[in-house]
Image (tube, coloured by chain):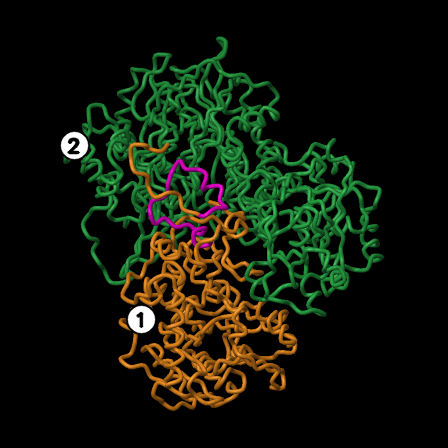
Chain colours: A orange, B green
Amino acid sequence: MSKSNQPRIPETKGVGGDPRERLEDVADPPGKIWFRDLDEAVIEADRCIQCASCVAACPSDSIGIDEAEGRPTLVRMCTGCSRCWDFCPRSGLRYERVLEFAAEERALEEPAIYAAKASDDAAAAGQDGGVVTALLAELVEAGELDGAVVARERDDDPLRGEAFLATSRTELLEAGGSIYNQTMGLGQVDDLLADADLETDDPDLALVGTPCTIQGVTALDRYDNPAADPIALTVALMCTRSFEHGRLVSRLAEFDVDPEAVDGLDVSGGTLYAYDADGGELLAEDVDAFGAAGLRGCDECTDFVGGAADVSAGSVGTADGETTIVVRTETGARAWDAAAAALEATAVERPETLEKLSAWNRRRAESILPREFDPEGEVGITYEQHLEAYDGTDREPEPLNPARVHQYEEWC
Amino acid sequence: MAIGPTNEEARSTVTETPTVVSPAWLETHCETVTVVDVRDRREYEDLGHVPDAVNVPADRFRDPSSVAAGKLPDPDAFADLLGERGIDSGDSLVAVGDENGVLAARFLLTASVYGHEGELYLLDGGLEAWREEHELTTQAPALEPTSYEAELRDDAPIVDRQAVEAAAEGDAVVVDTRTPAEYDQSHIPGAVQLGWEALLDDAGRLKPDDELEDLLTERGISRDERIVLYCNTARRLSHTYVVLRSLGYGDVRFYEGSLTDWLRANSPDWDPIQLYENVREVASNGFEALPRELGEDVFGRLHLIGLYTQRQEGYFMLRTKVPGGILTAEQARAFGEIAEEFATAPEEHGGSEQNPVHGDGFLDVTTRQGLQLHWIRIEDMPEIWDRYDEVGLTTIQASGNTLRNVVACPAAGLGDETIDVRPIAERVADRFEGDRELANLPRKLKVSVAGCHENCGRAEIQDLGFTPAIKGGRDGFAVKVGGGLSDGPRAATDLGIFVEPNQVADLSEAAAKLFIDHGSYLDTAVNRLRFIVAEYGVDAFRDELERYAPFAFEPYDEAFTTDYRGDHVGVHEQDDGTSYVGVNIPTGRIGGDEFAELAALAEEYGSGQLRLTPNQNVVLTGVPDASLEALQDEPLLSTYSPDPGPFSRGIVTCTGREFCKYGVVETKGRGYRWAKGLDEWAEETGLADALETVRVHMSGCSASCAQPQIADVGLRGEVYRDDYESTRAADVGLGGDLENDAFVDWLVGSVPIDGIPSVIERTVRAYEIDREDGESFADWTRRMPDTELRRLVAEGPEPNRPVVGTEVS
């Protein structure tokens, strides 16, 4: 059915592995995106950062989470609407522009920066100063929030986190402490709410996550996507990279650390520490030695601090036992004030070490990012633009994975 | 084309014997063997591997794209892969993977069936076991490429579907290597369950021999039996295969395909008649009770009896089968009354004002000449089915992975045709109805039959399309095969064969059986007959189909499809001197009371028969000349006109976002409003007289329920986003034309939806100005360069830039 007298529409997308590529009766219009394109460009190319923005963005709930792999996967028919691509910080969403928008449209004139710690039991339960735990517990107790989507360690798998909707101080304390793998909570908000059985049908939740997760939810919110409706407060955990759970455990074993014995992990000053249940140090090793356990897609992210979030939290720049907090928006400031009673906070200048790490992270990311880093560029990146930048690099699209793209059983 | 060797061949001796070995064994033999690590490249490189191990990642030797050949890779690709890694056919190989060893076993099995000559070993406990005592290295081994050759061994222990069926009849022990839970849900009759995990201890090591022997003996698996293994994706069985062979079981074979359809055909849960009975029984307990009483997966199974959950929780869309689209007035009246009475929206969803045009109590005529209702409550289904029974309607296999409603020329039996296809359409439908096996195909199967010369069955877009042909003076059919529109569209290809009228049902069944054997795999998204046709090529497909058909194929002398007829709107003469009157139902939606009134008109003025058309219109047949004027004067026919404006006449839409859970945009109301508005525009601009019909087909998403690919203007729901705005949108394609075997070219993606009517106006006006005498819209689009058309579509006033997020999507 081709029309030989006319220029062809750009040839069929896809880099192999799909029988549809052999059928050429109709070419898609330029820019058409299916989940399989995301799979090739991001997931199979080993660039997925497991932020779950695609899962949240899909209007037909066609994208689920592969339990074993912790990766997005099709669970029912893809309708070709391109939403997953549009909100993926590794493909269609120019995250640096999202950060710009956040700064222009939502940020306080100057962010407020604190060295803080919890004034109560949260200090022991949480990471560093336990501030995130205390902040959320206070807001939930005061009725400002109905709950918070956080990560907690799974019962059945040491060190492996899972998404959890905490709706009380007790639950927040239980979930305190950092998890170093992605839990894709953004993609599970509806399910978590359905299980939680809250009294309200219009809940206000906090979402605690990595900077990329917050980029995704902030963009969804900016376009009034219903997936962001329940999220009333975003808290970013400062981050240079996330780990793949299996690889992390495997790497720990290389250093003769029994994952079962590890009670907590901490990355501080470029060193990864593992502690046992009594606080004894099991390991102190340069975090770079764990590079192979990290998500490769994290290399492309300049956003160490989580610039789209209402509140960011991290350990860099403050003393042991304290949390560095950046309050960036009105929403963040209101939450911070409402929780003041539970916190001991000192306003500080932006710490130099934070600046340094942030700048280093950005330089590194820009050197790795195959596309141009352009905070002024259009927020959307088309498939063609993506290909232009990534083809020929070691981050180019790889043939799709049929198990992820073809094996579902629900259609219209 | 059978997947494996025939039974005869498979009985010949198997020579190779993979063996399970310990890390200690590997240590002593590491100088003489090649270790093959099947993990991801990245894990191999970054996390480390056994010294000197070569990396052959599992995703490289499990074919991701093959439709028909199970899960084995192309032999040449496999040979290249091993050659690149410096492996010789005579090398002894030790496969290492993750602790569970399934993929490592898969590698050994693949090497074995492709004739690897050296010894094959599986490392017990995988890399974890090795690491307990040994270091890993990240140092890459020096590789010297070889020219490895791979060819499927004649005596490869792969069996085909028939052999599994024979085994199930008792000539071998059939072993289900899936989990007990999967086995409990459904399994091959007579199969014993032995999950591969049961063979391993807590540390992932193979259990001691005596424990394994006990496990096997308990299940009747012994060395003097023939053993046939199956699972879903041919991974798990690989492990069991290696273990059994290692234990000295000589006659072990395996099936590469997925048996999901077969398992279902043997499960009462997937028997449409049984399901119908079960639903009748529990319906009064309400929606919530369905998964509780009939299983969590019940909503997927309900498609088999026409029920789809709709967007609004707790309600169903009900699809009703109407073979050939032929309804008696009695059926139409009963159906209209059912719509009026049961397809009613609850108050919280707008009640009788739910839909701005139609209120509620309406029905939709579909592009497969079927009927759909919305807002159906499960509690009402027994009553609805009772009323169906009274007039001979059914929802059994109205949907699901089975034969879909058989499409036929809406003017069948009225003249101007080679064969009256009405009884044939009925026979094909009857052949599949209630048959458990044919109710559970790998995916749906679409069949059309036309006796006219105008391709009213739209053969190109069916899995199987019958069109009239002649052979030695006998009338019959030509057959087109492998068409379809949605993701991965393909126009059906002519098989070149002649089929007698009484062979149409036989050939449809043969195609279904072929589909079962060759399309039975897990990659469901690309599992339609057309992918098999495309992979085999039409000649090989025909040869294979002939093996399934109960008659020998012969070529036709001449095929008679000469023309393509877009629709049946208007007044047309019949052979018997009366006329049929096609009335236009824009978007196919009509009130239940109005449909009942149409039935009454069919009785009063015509023969008492109605036909549903693939353009979502209705035809009243057998109207004598004397009654024509009175019929046309009926008030209902000013709403549903035999002489509509060009856009109302051409509009076709799917259900859309109003009810469909997949819909990205709302279609019915939008299509109706656009058609009426564009008709007015055409009137005002004087274009209405020049244009008979402009076929605008709008699907709410990129599935093809509205068949946008065959329209003048094809639209499918999308979203549009720029830096400041997100809005619903549509992909725009132009120039679909079945007469010339052309699907639309999708010219521009994601055009904001409110701009579409002006896109249509610009395009139609350009056509009117530019067209040559007698040139159709589609012809014109073919003559125009795509760049020009793209400019026409894309050019338009800058969209107003509202504040961010004015419309949710």
Q: Is residue B802 left or right of residue B662?
A: left
> In which quadrant will I find the C terminus of chain B?
bottom left
Q: Over which residues does the magenta segment extend?
A: A15-39
Query: Where, by quadrant of the figure, is residue B164 drawn?
Result: top right
Numbered circles on residues, count: 2
Q: Looking at the image, which residue is at 26% across and 80% down?
A: A109
Is A307 magenta? The answer is no
Q: Determine which residue is flagged by label 1.
A: A102
Is A38 magenta? The answer is yes
Up the image or down, A39 lies above or below B138; here it is above
Whether residue B299 is visible here, answered yes or no, is yes
Q: Main secondary structure of the magenta part?
A: loop
Query: Where, by quadrant of the figure, is residue B331 drawn?
Result: top left
Q: Looking at the image, which residue is at 57% across and 39% down?
A: B442
Query: Where, by quadrant of the figure, is residue B135 drawn?
Result: bottom right
Q: Residue B769: which numbered mark, if any?
A: 2
